[in-house]
């Protein structure tokens, strides 16, 4: 079965797009074909894949129109390096799309409906969601089989994550989705060795302090190994490349691979 | 402003997850009811197709000890009148049924070669099965205070999601914190946790304070003894007797206690105590010095023991001597 993964967070700049493109790259190395969907009006996926800003009629917006008949506007990512990663890009036009969908019949289910009517051949679809909960999150969730959450271990991000999880379960049940999307795991990102981050990840000085791991264990949500903050990851993105191409020797690649393996195994 | 506690941050998220799971389980239950097509839920199932409840390692187990005398009585009753109340089983993946409630009745039927037994079949996941089994144990009239206490604690571990090697320690210290919190209003514990603890205890007629002071100490037995009770080889009565005997004889006495009646065991213990040499040397396994010291010290530190020592000038002086001796040893080590 095709896996459809929403990469979500409830705060900006925590590494969603970075995670999305690196997972796409590692999945393709595992022999999977991947379609990346840029659901963010900021169009960061375009930049991170080294592509040019598309015209509005070649973005996700056209897929979410009632007259869409299956001609997905797909662009290949890193075609000189790998095969099998295609992108359906977002952009500023999506801010209008979201407003339009409010009045559309089954607006929240529109992406899910289109993917059902005009299925893509890819093994994995990855939806790169915007930074805070909005309409595009609901549309992506309705189309997803799984979600991966990512945060920086800052208190404000942790607090926002709590709200995202609450939203996820309530929305999931309200939309009566089948199959019910599950949270595949949480990826702590941009870990810096300082007190607040250590506390939140459970390596702080107070052993009694409740950590994210404790909470996630209680909620039954898997936590992947944390990815340390480092310039190479940001530089790779700015150069429009996944870390695996930009710096194949970096340790974080092993974590991306691990998550990619989890995705390809998960049923 | 202090930093916000993560538990507090995640309280609504936790509620949302729990609600979602609750809805899912209610749906499953309705689905299960539908498939039964309104048929009577009780069935005669083959006694040989049943086994004890099997749960994953580390989840805790419902009680295992069954008094042989009581089992005999029950057997006689079943031979005469049959099983009066259906047992509760769950279907397992290997085609067997596992007892959730009514293990004693099932065992008796097996021993008197009854071919079938009346059972209610209910699909239960591990957590629910353990919960039902524990509640059934606590409500049983046959249950000893140790087993009852143990089962209540297991139930609380389940509700509070306390897992891992240290789970026994964790739940005990949590209950103590809850009691202190209740008395003083201070402590490193959430009000919601205290409420949950009190509600759980209350549903079995316990008060938090008296449960902590009167019931918890029952489980302060040496680990091998408690283990033997939990696996069902040793009766709770014999366990209490052994726990009062000198620690170096525990291992031997556990072996004796598995077969012996309370009376026989008591006799054996007094024989051991009166003779300077152990009765049966060959069966005593030497416990390492480190363990022996640790065990004695563990007892000494217990509040009740320590109060006695503290109130007795002679004993207190001897404890001072031990302290000095230990200090000297450590100084010699450099």
Image (cartoon, coloured by chain):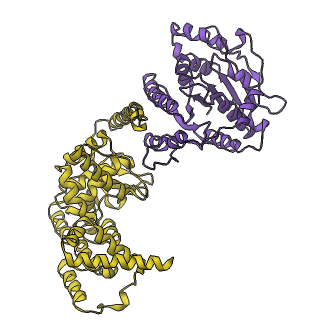
Chain colours: A purple, B yellow
Q: Looking at the rendering, which quadrant does residue A39 occupy?
A: top right
Q: Looking at the rendering, which quadrant does residue A62 occupy?
A: top right
Q: Looking at the picture, tell me which residue is in the foreground, B271 or B127.
A: B271
Residue under the image location 52 percent in, 16 percent down: A108
Q: Looking at the picture, tell me which residue is in the foreground, A17 or B117.
A: A17
The percent position of residue B213, horizontal first and vertical second, equals: 20, 58
In this picture, is A91 found above or below B142?
A: above
The percent position of residue A119, horizontal first and vertical second, equals: 65, 23
Q: Look at the image and tell me in which quarter the N terminus of chain B lies.
A: top left
Q: Looking at the picture, tell me which residue is in the foreground, B303 or A27.
A: B303
**B299 displayed left or right of B80:** right
Residue under the image location 37 percent in, 80 percent down: B325
Specify whether residue B60 is in view. Answer: no
Specify whether residue B131 is in view. Answer: yes
**B94 displayed left or right of A186:** left
In this picture, is B222 found above or below B10?
A: below
Residue under the image location 37 percent in, 73 percent down: B294
Total numbered circles: 0
The percent position of residue A105, horizontal first and vertical second, equals: 51, 9
The percent position of residue A137, horizontal first and vertical second, equals: 54, 21
**B46 displayed left or right of A141:** left
In this picture, is A123 found above or below B109?
A: above
């Amino acid at each position: 079965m095709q896996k459809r993964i929403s990469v979500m967070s409830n705060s900006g700049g925590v590494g969603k797009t970075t995670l999305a493109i690196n997972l796409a790259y590692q999945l393709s190395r595992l022999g999977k074909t991947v379609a990346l969907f840029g659901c963010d009006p900021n169009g960061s996926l375009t930049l991170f894949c080294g592509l040019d800003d598309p015209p509005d009629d070649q973005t996700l917006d056209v897929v979410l129109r009632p007259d869409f008949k299956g001609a997905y506007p797909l662009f290949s990512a890193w075609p000189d390096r790998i095969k099998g990663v295609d992108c359906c890009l977002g952009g500023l036009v999506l801010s209008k799309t979201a407003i339009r969908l409010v009045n559309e019949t089954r607006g929240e289910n529109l992406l899910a409906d289109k993917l059902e009517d005009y299925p893509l051949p890819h093994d994995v679809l990855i939806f790169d969601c915007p930074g805070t909960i909005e309409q595009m999150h609901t549309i992506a969730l309705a189309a997803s089989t799984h979600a991966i959450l990512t945060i920086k271990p800052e208190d404000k991000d942790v607090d926002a994550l709590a709200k995202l999880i609450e939203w996820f379960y309530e929305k999931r049940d309200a939309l009566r989705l089948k199959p019910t999307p599950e949270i595949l795991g949480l990826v702590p990102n941009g870990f810096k060795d300082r007190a607040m981050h250590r506390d939140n990840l459970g390596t702080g000085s107070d052993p009694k302090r409740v950590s994210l791991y404790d909470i996630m264990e209680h909620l039954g949500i898997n936590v992947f190994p944390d990815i340390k903050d480092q310039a190479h990851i940001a530089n790779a993105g700015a150069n429009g490349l996944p870390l695996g191409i930009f710096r194949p020797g970096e340790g974080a690649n092993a974590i991306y691979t691990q998550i990619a393996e989890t995705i390809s195994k998960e049923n | 402003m202090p930093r916000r506690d993560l538990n507090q941050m995640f309280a609504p998220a936790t509620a949302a997850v729990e609600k979602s799971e609750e809805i899912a389980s209610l749906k499953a239950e309705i689905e299960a009811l539908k498939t039964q097509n309104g048929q009577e839920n009780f069935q005669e199932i083959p006694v040989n197709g049943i086994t004890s409840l099997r749960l994953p390692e580390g989840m805790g187990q419902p009680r295992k000890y069954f008094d042989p005398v009581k089992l005999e009585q029950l057997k006689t009753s079943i031979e005469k009148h049959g099983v009066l109340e259906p047992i509760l089983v769950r279907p397992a993946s290997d085609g067997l049924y596992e007892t959730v409630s009514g293990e004693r009745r099932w065992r008796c039927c097996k021993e008197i070669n009854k071919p079938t037994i009346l059972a209610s079949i209910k699909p239960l996941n591990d957590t629910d099965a353990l919960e039902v089994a524990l509640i059934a144990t606590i409500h049983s009239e046959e249950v000893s205070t140790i087993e009852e206490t143990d089962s209540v604690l297991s139930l609380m571990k389940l509700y509070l999601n306390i897992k891992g090697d240290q789970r026994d320690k964790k739940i005990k210290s949590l209950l103590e914190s809850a009691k202190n919190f209740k008395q003083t209003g201070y402590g490193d514990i959430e009000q919601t946790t205290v409420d949950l603890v009190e509600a759980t205890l209350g549903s079995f007629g316990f008060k938090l304070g008296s449960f902590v002071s009167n019931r918890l100490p029952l489980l302060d037995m040496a680990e091998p003894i408690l283990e033997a009770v939990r696996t069902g080889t040793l009766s709770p009565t014999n366990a209490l007797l052994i726990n009062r005997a000198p620690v170096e004889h525990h291992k031997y006495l556990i072996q004796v206690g598995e077969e012996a009646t309370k009376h026989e065991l008591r006799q054996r213990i007094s024989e051991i105590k009166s003779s300077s040499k152990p009765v049966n040397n060959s069966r005593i396994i030497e416990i390492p010095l480190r363990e022996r010291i640790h065990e004695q010290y563990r007892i000494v530190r217990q509040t009740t023991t320590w109060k006695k020592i503290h109130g007795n000038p002679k004993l207190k002086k001897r404890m001072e001597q031990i302290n000095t001796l230990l200090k000297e040893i450590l100084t010699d080590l450099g």
